[in-house]
Amino acid sequence: MRKLTSLLISTYNWPEALELVMESILLQKILPDEVVIADDGSRQETASLIEKYKAIFPIPLKHVWHTDDGFRKTIIMNKAIHSASGNYIIQIDGDILLHPEFVNDHIKEATYGYFIKGSRGKLSEELTQELIKSKQAKISLLSKGVGSRINSTRLPVLSPLFYGDPVKTNDLRGCNFAFWKSDFIAVNGYNNDLTGWGHEDIELAARLVNYGIKRKQLKMTAICFHLFHKLNSRDQENSNYKAYLDAINFKTKTCNNGYLESLL
């Protein structure tokens, strides 16, 4: 079966950052088969930006949107993955700039029976503002303001040294995450009962591991960079983390309100 790759981007009301993300996609050595944007209710500025890039993208660009009714990332992610044509999903956030080999690295690392937990470098507030002002998505490891040097360094020959614990789930980040769509559907996707910021990714990872899908950690390959921003409200963090612990303790494989329920 041919691997068809969908690059999935979550976004909410930060079109300046999303524009940089789109520019970094255009710099990819190997493009995904499509890009799908999961939009948790952004205003018209984001829709207009996406329409601009639809006209110049050499691959399909889909925009999946629902009304703004609070932090409902899990629901829009489920809907976006339903619309994805690819059988392999590479997931990032709308504030993540991609190394030119990012997609290519992920495609090379894709393995049946595994999901990918990637890493990210961090950019300072000053460098973030400079990039937004210039609308330039190229990042040099030597640039002032690039943090997390190991995570920001691409050296694929060393990457296997970091594959790590195949059943560890508490450090997954949805900003650099890849999986087979069939595995995602098998565990009923993201848990829609997790509202507000926090831990929806690790709760999903726990159910994937319980289902028998192992984790492969990537460092020094599939490099990406996180734009600086202020922290989101974390009012629901504790209750969401409890759901993660429940998935661990009860060996939960699916959720009752997830991917399938998002389609009703």
Image (spheres, grey):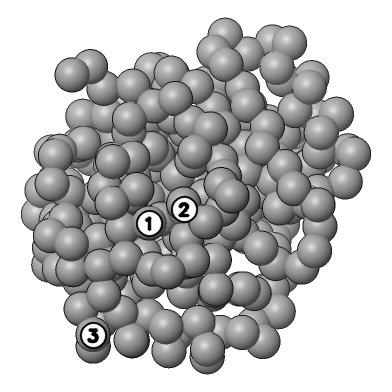
Quarter of the image for the N terminus: give it: top left
In the picture, measured across the screen, residue 109 lies left or right of residue 79, that is left
Crowd around label 2: few <14 · some 14–19 · many ≥20 (10 Å): many
Which of disc 3 and disc 2 is earlier in sequence? 3
* Residue at image location 69% in from the left, 73% down from the top: 232
> Does the CB distance between marks 3 and 1 fall below 8 Å?
no
Q: Quickly name the residue at label 1.
A: 188
Q: Which residue is at the front of the view, 16 or 13?
A: 13
Q: Residue furthest front?
A: 264
Q: Secondary structure at mark 2?
A: helix
In which quadrant of the rendered view does residue 47 lie?
top right
* Residue at image location 61% in from the left, 84% down from the top: 236
Which of disc 1 and disc 3 is earlier in sequence? 1
Q: Quickly name the residue at label 3.
A: 250
* Numbered-mark total: 3
Does residue 108 lie above or below 65 as drawn? above
Amino acid carrying mark 2 in the image: Tyr
Q: Secondary structure at mark 1?
A: loop
> Does the CB distance between marks 2 and 1 fall below 8 Å?
yes
Q: Secondary structure at mark 3?
A: loop
Report, in whole angstroms, how far the alpha carbon at label 2 lies from the one at label 3: 20 Å
Crowd around label 1: few <14 · some 14–19 · many ≥20 (10 Å): many
Amino acid carrying mark 3 in the image: Phe
Which of disc 1 and disc 2 is earlier in sequence? 1
In which quadrant of the rendered view does residue 18 lie?
top right
Report, in whole angstroms, how far the alpha carbon at label 3 lies from the one at label 1: 16 Å
Amino acid carrying mark 1 in the image: Asn
Looking at the picture, how far across and down is residue 198, in whole percent? 54, 75
